[in-house]
Image (cartoon, rainbow, N blue to C red):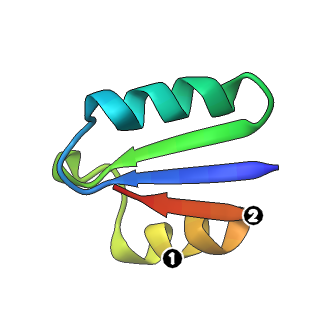
Amino acid sequence: MKILHILNDGPTDLSTKVIEAESRDHEVKVIELPKKEVSYEALVDEIAAHDRVMSW
């Protein structure tokens, strides 16, 4: 399963633990919005390309 985590305010202790746990069995990608890593269009493409999306 491909899982996307979108961090709105950067990582937290909980998000870090969940991401680490899911990374053991799944393909996980993390996007930190405050770092402006992707454009809006690229973010929409990433959301569509993943099976599960979690926004923190």
Q: Amino acid at mark 2?
A: Asp
Could you tell me which secondary element the residue under label 2 belongs to? Answer: loop
Q: Nearer the viewer, residue 22 or 42?
A: 22
The residue sitting at 47% across, 42% down in the picture is 30
Position of 17 relative to 28 (above/below): above
21 relative position to 32: left or right: right
The residue sitting at 40% across, 48% down in the picture is 31
The residue that label 1 is drawn on is 44
Q: Using the rendered view, name the quadrant where residue 40 is placed.
A: bottom left
Report, in whole angstroms, how far the alpha carbon at label 2 lies from the one at label 1: 13 Å
Residue 25 picture location, percent across and down: 80, 29
Q: Nearer the viewer, residue 47 or 55?
A: 55
Q: Using the rendered view, name the quadrant where residue 22 is placed.
A: top right
The residue that label 2 is drawn on is 51
The residue sitting at 26% across, 55% down in the picture is 33
4 relative position to 15: left or right: right
Q: Earlier in the sequence, mark 2 or mark 1?
A: 1
- Residue 26, label in figure: none
Q: Amino acid at mark 1?
A: Val
